[in-house]
């Protein structure tokens, strides 16, 4: 029987995925079932979806402006803490449930200029055009393919034994901590490809216009959060330092939460990586299978799903990135059933259980292979 390549079985030193290998006929049927599910969902999109994303946009605005208004009351604990949390919540929702999903083109069918995926600009230092290329195109096309998907470790973290070890990985718990604290900067700088510049694979002339674009967006964000609103506080007789600190903490909360969600969606113990050879002759069924095996879901209630931008359903997002994320919960029920029929593991666990496996990967794979094979290491 002709079978699909035996890739994506996971990492034996951490965990083994229990996936049945599929014949070419099964792969074709697997892809057709998921294509049919996508078509049915697309045909059902309508006013309820439009009303939902408009409501999200309104909530984002309400949280941000309410938070900023409360920060004007200075260090008074109830208002300062509530203002910071509201601003942080608004930034998280804008980043996860609004910006990320809109930029995938999930709401282009509405023909609303403010919700057009190709033109939306989000509230982080990284230009949206950077994200549309590194994430929407590169990551979603080459999900977890080593050497093709730069999101596998973001160039500074070794999370799979298939990644070639380098000495600076010994310190990756430190690198990951810095990345989490400064996550919006990390994803922006990723697009500049400074590693290729250092290695001489690209020229400074190629990087310069991207650096200017990044600098412009950076100044715009810093000017808004760390200059405009503190100055407004001074003009109103409020405490500018309280406003500045509230903005800093709100951005930090958004960075940490985004890092947590993204790492738990891609680097848990049963997430798989693939060699570049899997792309040779890859069919639609192969592509779906790679998305399934390289992604991880988070179990939880509606609040968790909204705060993650429904990336708690990372499997469904990778299978159907252009479908409105609010549909992922209902899609997940059918995707699970399809996985059962085809003998595929559906990787899902609680947020903290999944994050524990991510931390384990970070700790284990900081060491060179020789040290890992030593039982005393």
Image: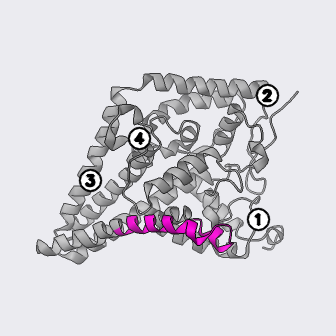
Q: Secondary structure at mark 1?
A: loop
Name which of mark 4 and mark 2 comes first in the sequence. 2
Instruction: Name the one closer to the observer, 324 or 138.
Output: 138
Q: CA distance from mark 4 to mark 1?
A: 39 Å
Quickly name the residue at label 3.
63
Quickly name the residue at label 4.
302
Disc 3, disc 4: CB below 8 Å? no
Assign the magenta stretch its main secondary structure: helix
Q: Which residues are magenta?
A: 193-219
Judge from the rendering whether residue 260 lies leftward or rightward of residue 58; answer left or right.
Answer: right
Quickly name the residue at label 2.
24
Judge from the rendering whether residue 285 lies leftward or rightward of residue 242; answer left or right.
Answer: right
At which x and y percent is residue 74? 19, 72
Name which of mark 2 and mark 3 comes first in the sequence. 2
Q: Secondary structure at mark 3?
A: helix
At which x and y percent is residue 345? 68, 38
Quickly name the residue at label 1.
164
Instruction: Name the one closer to the observer, 263 or 164.
Output: 164
Residue 205 higher or lower than 27, as above or below? below
Q: Secondary structure at mark 4?
A: helix
Q: CA distance from mark 2 to mark 1?
A: 31 Å
Q: Residue at x 39, y 47 (%)?
A: 119
């Amino acid at each position: 029987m002709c079978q699909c390549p035996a890739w994506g079985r996971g990492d034996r030193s951490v965990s083994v995925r229990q996936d049945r290998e599929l014949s070419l006929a099964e792969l074709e049927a697997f892809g057709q079932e998921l294509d049919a599910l996508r078509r049915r969902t697309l045909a059902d999109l309508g006013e309820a979806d439009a009303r939902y994303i408009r409501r999200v946009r309104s909530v984002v605005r309400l949280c941000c402006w309410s938070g900023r208004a409360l920060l004007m009351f200075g260090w008074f604990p109830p208002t300062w803490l509530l203002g910071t949390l509201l601003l942080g919540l608004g930034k998280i929702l804008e980043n996860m449930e609004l910006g990320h999903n809109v930029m995938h083109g999930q709401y282009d069918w509405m023909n609303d200029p403010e919700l057009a995926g190709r033109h939306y600009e989000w509230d982080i230092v990284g230009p949206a055009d950077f994200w549309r290329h590194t994430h929407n195109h590169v990551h979603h096309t080459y999900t977890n393919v080593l050497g093709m998907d730069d999101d596998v470790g973001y160039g500074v973290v070794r999370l799979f034994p298939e990644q070639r070890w380098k000495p600076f990985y010994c310190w990756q718990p430190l690198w990951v901590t810095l990345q989490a604290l400064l996550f919006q900067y990390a994803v922006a700088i990723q697009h500049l490809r400074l590693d290729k510049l250092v290695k001489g694979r690209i020229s400074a002339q190629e990087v310069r216009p991207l650096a200017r674009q990044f600098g412009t967006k950076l100044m715009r964000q810093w000017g808004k959060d760390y200059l405009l609103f503190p100055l407004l506080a001074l003009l109103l007789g409020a405490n500018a330092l309280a406003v500045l600190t509230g903005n800093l903490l709100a951005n930090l909360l958004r960075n940490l939460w985004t890092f947590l969600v993204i790492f738990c969606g891609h680097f848990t113990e049963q997430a798989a990586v693939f060699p570049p050879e899997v792309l040779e002759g890859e069919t639609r069924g192969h592509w779906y299978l790679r998305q399934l095996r390289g992604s991880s879901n988070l179990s939880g209630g509606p609040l968790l799903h909204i705060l993650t931008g429904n990336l708690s359903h990372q499997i469904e997002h990778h299978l159907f990135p252009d479908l409105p994320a609010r549909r992922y919960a209902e899609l997940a029920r059918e995707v699970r059933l399809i996985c059962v029929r085809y003998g595929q593991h559906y990787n899902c666990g609680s947020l903290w259980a999944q994050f524990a496996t991510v931390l384990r990967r970070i700790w284990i794979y900081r060491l060179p292979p020789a040290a890992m094979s030593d039982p005393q290491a």
